Image: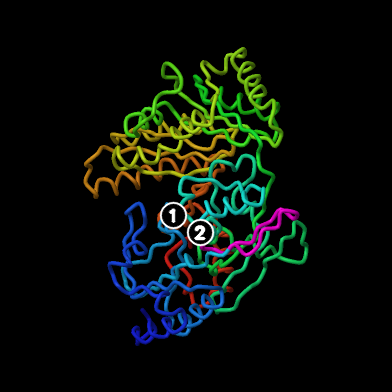
Amino acid sequence: MADRDPEGLVRRLRDVVGPAGVVTDPGAQASYTRDWLGKWQGRVPVVVRPGNTQETAAVVRLCREAHTPIVPQGGNTGMSGGATPDASGAQVIVSTTRLQQVRAVDPVNNTMTVEAGVVLAQAQDAARGAGRFFPLSLGAEGSCTVGGNLATNAGGIAVLRYGNMRDLVLGLEVVLPDGRIWNGLRGLRKDNTGYDLRGLFVGSEGTLGIITAAVLKLFPQAAARATAWVGAASLEALLALLQQARARCGERLVAFEMMTDAALQLVLRHVADTRAPVAGAPPFHALVELADTEPSGLADALEQVLAGAMDAGLVGEAVIAASQSQAQALWKLREGISQAQVRAGPVVKHDIALPITVLPAFCGEAQAAVARTGLDTQVINFGHLGDGNLHYNVLLPAGLPPDAVKDATARLNRAVHDLVVRHTGSISAEHGVGQLRRDELRHYKSPVEMDLMLAIKRALDPNLIMNPGKLL
């Protein structure tokens, strides 16, 4: 901590947020100072939990005056270490988890104003209670928060239809690095009055300020869903199926998830109460879901798409869920991949985005590039095929020593990321840069882009106190 009187700063912070708003016991801090994957462990003198926006602003002003770096944190479910402090003990965590109010739900304007600490599942429930639908959906929705979703520009399984978090927010309230509050909580879909400040803060990973509230877009609730699992011989066949589904179903197509058979077999081995949905072992699988406000005809539409794909030789076998429980069983296979990987051994994760057109070529070249490293690996390739976001992960042997894992990670990152950039893709699609991909970002971003981002950072945070060591 840069403050020469750290105990004095903690005392002043306690005066602002009250005794319930500070956590100083190291044991009680454990869930804040370590990321949920267990990759990063930090140390702080205090975790501050302000109870409202004004307290958040006061906390930031005190830290700025004390030259103390701030690590903003939501639900601490990130995949890239973006909310974990370093080990210096010089930083302070500012947690938004007490900012839990749903301030307003406007079903006529199709908007909802919520604070940053509202858990994603609670935001979904609030929308549902007003007869509306908030579409962001991901595995950690029971514990991740809206503020963290905004800070990382979260994606998830419905991006194909609704877009990622940047597409789902209309306005923001942000505490700036100097302690001022920007109130941009406007539920407008058209506003041509200057720079897009909202878009600047979404995805900034807490490096430009602390998001304290947001106006989110709402949508009509779906009256019906139809879910299918299909097996195919090639990725090209699945892409052709995707195009047919889009052409026939339009915006009713909400999800098109892909996994290789290696990914499916991993789930079947390591996740309880799962079974293969189709016979045999086709090399590729897809989970397809339609949703509509019209309750009838959806299953027929999906059946027609699949029948056409079978007639064209694109799909070998397919099954359409006959009930909600069957649909949930299919989704459990897709959502169980991350859990299965953890149980199988160390994994080098690549959260990448590519133009859909180049996905088959990329996957073939990446498989060869991984093989050329000479490492003992297994590729676990899955992701959101409909929006081009692959989780191109590489399993390493269980029990591999940490130094060997570190060396393998560096070699595999270079092999995969070089190909991603060559195919005009992104090395971080939905998990953020954090500290995991910070060096990779510097390696691949053009000097012009880096200069622009650094100029914005210096303009808004000249003292460089907001989430140092992350993103930039």
Disc 2 designates what residue? Answer: 148
Name of the residue lying farthest toward the top: 311
Task: List x then y, in percent, for residue 339.
Answer: 37, 41
Q: Is residue 401 left or right of residue 113?
A: left
Dot 1 and dot 2 residues touching (CB under 8 Å): yes
- Give the magenta-colored segment's residue range: 102-117
Disc 2 marks a residue whose amino acid type is Gly
- Give the residue number, with chain letter if any, for mark 1: 78
Residue at image x 49%, y 19%?
Answer: 233
Q: Which sits in the foreground, 266 or 414?
A: 266
Gap between marks 1 and 2 measured at Cα: 8 Å
Judged from the image, the secondary structure of the residue bearing numbered disc 2 is helix
- Magenta-drawn stretch, dominant element (helix, strand or loop): strand
Secondary structure under tag 1 reads loop
Type of residue at label 1?
A: Gly
Which quadrant holds residue 300?
Answer: top right
Pick the front one: 349 or 447? 349
